């Protein structure tokens, strides 16, 4: 929530940096490393190569959801792909654990909404 507050305050770079730092603190995984992975390979990379447990996969998915939302709303070149990575991770988490929560369902719905109905802001 703090990250979203910083962004709403108009501090885009600070918000993404805050999210990236916290992602790395929780997972030892830099955002720059995740940005280099194709969206279809994210789950495989984190599970097979990094050996992440399902709970951490969900954490990464949640961070990517928030970072991707900000990026997408600001028309960042990685915004759409970050959201797709988050969606893939959250879907894998549900399938692997058979745990379905309101939070995850809401994030997935918001991702779909952003990807299909979002109109980027006009920064004139």
Image (cartoon, rainbow, N blue to C red):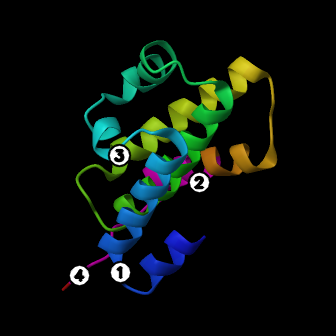
Q: Is mark 1 on a helix, strand or loop?
A: loop
Rounded to the nearest angstrom, the CA distance separating label 1 from label 4 is 15 Å
Q: Which of marks 2 and 4 is nearer the N terminus?
A: 2
Q: Which of marks 3 and 1 is nearer the N terminus?
A: 1
Circle 3 crowding by C-alpha within 10 Å: few under 14, some 14–19, many from 20: many
Determine the residue positioned at 42% across, 26% down. Answer: 42
Q: Answer yes or no: do the residues labelled 3 and 2 have beta carbons within 8 Å? A: no
The x and y percentages for residue 13 are: 30, 71
Rounded to the nearest angstrom, the CA distance separating label 2 from label 4 is 23 Å
Q: Answer yes or no: do the residues labelled 1 and 4 have beta carbons within 8 Å? A: no
Q: Is mark 4 on a helix, strand or loop?
A: loop
Task: Verify whether residue 83 appears in magenta.
Answer: no
Taking the image as shown, residue 57 lies to the left or right of residue 76, namely: right
Compared to residue 116, the image places residue 18 above or below, namely below
Q: Residue beneath label 2, please?
A: 110
Rounded to the nearest angstrom, the CA distance separating label 3 from label 2 is 21 Å
Q: Specify the segment rendered in magenta.
A: 109-123
Q: Can you tell which mark lies on residue 11?
A: 1
Circle 2 crowding by C-alpha within 10 Å: few under 14, some 14–19, many from 20: some
Q: What element carries label 2?
A: helix
Q: Which of marks 1 and 2 is nearer the N terminus?
A: 1
The x and y percentages for residue 62 are: 58, 48
Rounded to the nearest angstrom, the CA distance separating label 3 from label 4 is 26 Å
Taking the image as shown, residue 62 lies to the left or right of residue 123, namely: right
The x and y percentages for residue 33 are: 30, 37
Circle 4 crowding by C-alpha within 10 Å: few under 14, some 14–19, many from 20: few
Q: Residue beneath label 4, please?
A: 123
In this rendering, the label closer to the viewer, 3 or 2: 3
Q: Residue beneath label 3, please?
A: 31
């Amino acid at each position: 929530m703090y990250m979203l507050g910083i962004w709403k305050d108009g501090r885009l770079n600070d918000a993404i940096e805050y999210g990236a730092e916290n992602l790395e603190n929780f997972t030892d995984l830099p955002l720059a490393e995740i940005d280099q992975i194709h969206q279809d390979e994210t789950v495989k990379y984190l599970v097979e190569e990094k050996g992440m447990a399902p709970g951490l996969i969900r954490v990464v998915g949640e961070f990517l959801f928030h970072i991707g939302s900000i990026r997408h709303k600001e028309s960042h070149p990685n915004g759409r792909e970050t959201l797709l990575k988050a969606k893939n991770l959250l879907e894998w988490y549900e399938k692997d654990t058979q745990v379905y929560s309101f939070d995850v369902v809401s994030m997935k719905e918001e991702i779909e909404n952003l990807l299909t109905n979002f109109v980027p802001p006009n920064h004139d």
